[in-house]
Amino acid sequence: MSALFSEDFVAALTSLRIEARRVPRGGRHAEHHAREPGSGIEFRDYRAYTPGDDVRLVDWRLYRRFERLFLRLLDEVRDLPCYVLLDTSDSMWLDDARRATAARRVAAVLAAVSLNQLDAVSIHPFGADLGASSGTVEGKRGLHRVLGFLEALEPAGRTDIRTSLEKFGRLPQRHGLVVVVSDFFDDAGLDAVWQAVRALRHRVALVRLVAASDRDPTIDGELRLEDCETGSTVDVTVTDRVLARYRAAVAEFEQGIEQLAARRGATLLEVDVDQPVLPQFAGLFPDGVLRV
Amino acid sequence: MTFLGIGPWAVVGVVAAMAAALFALHHLRVRPAVQRVPTLLFWRRAIEESTARHLFARFRHPRTWAMLVALAGAIVLALADPTTGDGARRHRVLVVDTSDATRATRDGSPAIDAVRDAACAWLDDLPLGDRVALVASSRVVAGFDVPRPAVRDRLDTLVAGGASVARSVDVARALANGRGRSDVTVFAVSGAPADTDDVAWVAMRTDRGARALGAVEFVDALRVRVDAFAADDARRLVVRADARDAISVDVPACAGPGSAWVTVPGVPADGRDVVVALEPADATPHDDVVRYRLPDHRARALDVDASLGAVQWLVDADPRLVPANEGAAALAVRADGGGGSIAAGTRMRVAARPLGDAAATHRLPRLERDVTALGDGPGDACLTAGDAVLARLDRTATPPVLVLAADLFADDGIDGARVLRRAAVAAWLARTLHDAAGVVDGAIVARAGDDTATVLATDARGRAVPRPIPVAAADAAPVAIGDARVAFVGAALAPAVVQDGSAPPVSGGGFRPWEWLALVALALAAVDAALHLRRRIP
């Protein structure tokens, strides 16, 4: 294990689960219960036979007793492909890469949970464009491959969420769960994020990385602020009034993210990059289960 | 070329030094600390909102900065009033009184010493680029080509006991004539002829007599100016018309120190010669006598052509009146309001000052017109001459008089329109910037080189309020007009330097290029501010 992912960290991941409210048809046998009955092994219910039903599901023992045809409905368990879109833009690597570290840990958590549930996982880093993915990883032993991929990630320039997600959407993928892990600091604004997220034909979860310094910066006086991604600068005299307006802008941005997630029907998680990730995830997973 | 009275190389040096200082300051300025942030999204929002609430925040815009620099440069140029060519270097003629009066002792030392000391001090304070000539005892002691240290040496060698200072002044005038911007400055211990009021006098205050006499005629009256160093009750002012009718003024003439104006009534303006004198004469009697030829102000009856109608009358019957719009003193009479105030064929009594009369050597022109015939009608009457004349009807006088501004400029060879425009702009600025009550509707008076012109404005209560307006820097000769309704604000006895008449500083018409530039820059700044506000106001 590396410094980024300790043994304890990895061991703690096994207690978490992701439950999808809807599971896509087809796919492999896994642990996600489909809403409709299927061809699993666990009994769910009986239903009267109607012409056209699969006769292989007829319970002949009941027929012998009641001379009527009933079908045995079985619970179907399928897999839920998990696509983790990981923001690796330059802003994530600012301040000792604390955002990137938190983001990779989040991705590791998600990957570990999914792999534990026999789901397929792929990591798609993005910055100005969609980067090379980790490929589909399956099986619990694939976690080390995911962690190694996360360890090797590099800064990927500025943030362009729309371009990256549109490119991801054009990839031939099974429907599954898309988790976007980012700070969502895109110069194009939240409209671009909305356009990108709206076009995804997957279940979507947004993991927003927040830092206390973003909401309440501890700076003062005459400053030249430099955007770490674009290099553009702004001269600011930081006063109480300016700080108040800054906080108002941040609050408006956060409210916009929440509205965006609500409109899309996506799950929104917030992870404080200055706090350990796992305890936060434990809090975000009620009873150890995240329902998406 | 001069700039703020500094020579060209000095200007270049100053500009270079300022540029170097600015360059150094630019590089030594406190630079803001650079702080890297994950995004500028929120900071831009914060700054945008604060920009809309801070007046000077818009100056961050480079275009506005450039405009400000241009505006500042134009204003500096307008204030500095740079000149080129022959007018750049001022020629100064120093006249030192070495007449017998300078032999007098005061406080144990001869008066000539005080004159010399004052002249030396004056000489030391002159700008280096100016050329100086020295005149004393009606001869040129040092010409313009003599270096200044040599001029000073020759100044130290002057002794009392020379010719009259009046002749020295004539020599100095001849010397300065044709030299472009030139001054004649006289250092004297006694008075001087009144017609030398275009030169500066530095009084040594060693004489108790009058320094100068001046006068201006009015209808049936004469106003005499007496500049005195000290009160001298022993002397009286005497006015003799045609050397026959001695009119003794029952007013102490030398009520000084300062300038005193004495009105001498009963002097008919009928073209006769008048002698004004201070009697008994003192040691310099030529200073105390001045001669005038009074203009002919006798009323003339004019038949007004009935075909012109009842509202507007153009008085052109008098051959001594030039047609309208051909001169600053063209005379036209108009009765506003109609209503039969002047019926066709009314005989109007118009007393006019003869124009172009070479004998009228007085400086101050007449300001009054007898408009008794107009005063009975409704509305104001005014005289117009071109587009530059302002006038007001003084109904408080008996009979009502028209106070003209344009006439003030006619004798001095000044473009009155230009002075009026400058004053109007200044008044507009004053009214706009300082929210001064009142509207400039009165006479605006200025003469060549005067520091200040006075505008008669009307305040909210309808009272006439004189407002001093700076017109140009240089001359500051005291002038009183009429019954002090319009008066110059200037130094009466201050040792001011008077511009020689050869190059009046406020002639030529219109604004200087720098002034136009400043006005254009101001207008652009106003447009920019308006556009900025328009963008900011939803």
Image (cartoon, rainbow, N blue to C red):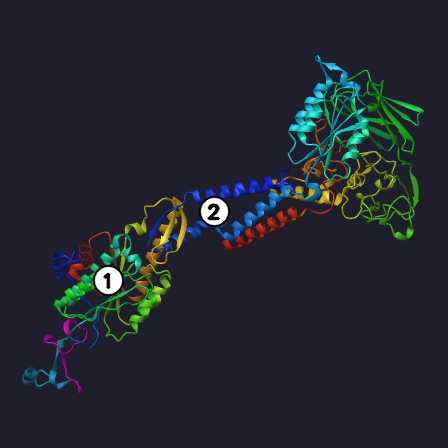
- Circle 2 SS class: loop
**Camera sees residue A197:** no
Left or right of residue B281: residue A232: left
**Camera sees residue A51:** yes
User: Quadrant of residue B366 in the image?
Assistant: top right
Q: Does B249 appear in magenta?
A: no
Outermost top residue: B108
- Residue A106 location (% of width, % of height): 21, 60
Outermost bottom residue: A51
Q: Chain of mark 1?
A: A
Left or right of residue B327: residue B10: left
Residue stretch rendered in magenta on the structure: A29-53
The three-letter amino acid code for the residue at tag 1 is Leu
The three-letter amino acid code for the residue at tag 2 is His
Cα gap from disc 1 to disc 2, whole angstroms: 45 Å
Residue position marked by numbered label 2 in the rendering = B54
Residue sitting nearer the eye, B148 or A31: B148
- Residue B305 location (% of width, % of height): 91, 50
Residue position marked by numbered label 1 in the rendering = A153
The residue carrying pointer 1 sits among few (fewer than 14), some (14 to 19) or many (20 or more) residues within 10 Å by Cα, namely some
- Which quadrant of the rendered structure holds the N terminus of chain B? top right
Q: Chain of mark 2?
A: B
- Residue B14 location (% of width, % of height): 56, 40
Left or right of residue B341: residue A269: left
Which residue is rendered at x = 30% and y = 50% of the image? A213
Residue sitting nearer the eye, B284 or B491: B284
Left or right of residue B305: residue B531: left
Q: Are marks 1 and 2 in contact (CB under 8 Å)?
A: no
Q: Is residue B433 above or below residue A91?
A: above
Residue sitting nearer the eye, A61 or B177: B177
- Residue A167 location (% of width, % of height): 31, 71
Q: How many marks?
A: 2
